[in-house]
Image (cartoon, grey):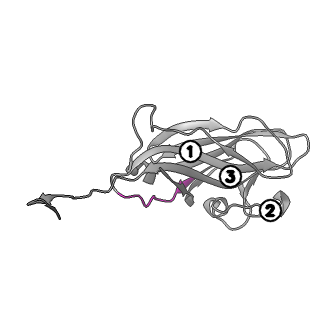
Amino acid sequence: MAIVNLLPDGDISNSPAWTIGTGSDVYAVLDDDDTGHVTSDSSDIEATATGKTCVVEMTDHSLDAGTTINSVQGVIKHNNRGRGTTYAIEMIILHSGGTYYTESTGTQSGASSWRTTTFTERTTSNGSAAWTLAQIDDLQMSLELTAHTGGTTGITYVYFTVDYTVPAAVTDNAILFGTAI
């Protein structure tokens, strides 16, 4: 088994809009991991009220035909730096035609450092069918602030971890007249 992380590489929508820390593209601030202090990170999206929703498309994979997809798992790095605040973020695994899975961070308490939520490892695209390479190429992520009691909620980094198995190499050990060729 091997792992590849698919990062955001394009905006689908941002409405009602999250505030973008720098620049004009949501994906551009969500594709870099920031390990610094929350207040010094301008490479994020922020909101002070519920209902803010964005959708980003993810990079295409570079996997060979015949590769088996074992699982897809969403990861987001987030926080709210207000004291005594709580918040929740909904993460949806999407494709261009609809929804695969919806999950939530659950209620989180405000903190001065970034928190990472690793969501459920999804071994199928619909509860029974294995993921396909075409589905992996069409992955999108939606992020919505669904609960918020004050302060500023931010998201600085998102990606999908794709666990996969490469096809076994074919070897030809034909025997011709008693000699391996």
Q: Earlier in the sequence, mark 2 or mark 1?
A: 2
**Residue furthest to the right:** 83
Give the residue pinned by disc 2. Answer: 36
User: Which residue is painted at 68% across and 52% down in the image?
Assistant: 17
Q: Which mark is residue 17?
A: 3
Magenta region, residue range: 56-64
Is residue 103 inside the magenta stretch?
no
- Majority SS type along the magenta span: loop
Residue placed furthest toward the top = 127
**Percent position (x, y) of residue 174?**
16, 58
Q: Amino acid at mark 1?
A: Gln
Name the one closer to the observer, 170 or 175. Answer: 175
SS of the residue at dot 1?
strand
Residue 16 at least partly seen: no
Percent position of residue 172, x then y: 22, 58
Is residue 135 toward the left or the right of residue 34 in the image? left
Disc 2 marks a residue whose amino acid type is Gly
Find the residue positioned furthest to the left: 177
Res 37 quadrant in image: bottom right
Q: Between tags 2 and 3, which lies in front?
A: 2
Q: Spatial distance from mark 2 to mark 3, Cα to Cα?
A: 25 Å
Q: Are marks 1 and 3 in contact (CB under 8 Å)?
A: no
Where disc 3 sits, the SS reads: loop
Residue plotted at (91% across, 44% down): 83
Residue at the spot of label 1: 73
Q: Is residue 79 left or right of residue 61?
A: right
Q: Dot 3, crowdedness within 10 Å: few (<14), some or many (≥20)?
A: some
Q: CA distance from mark 1 to mark 3?
A: 25 Å
Going 55% across and 50% down the picture, which residue do you hit? Answer: 161
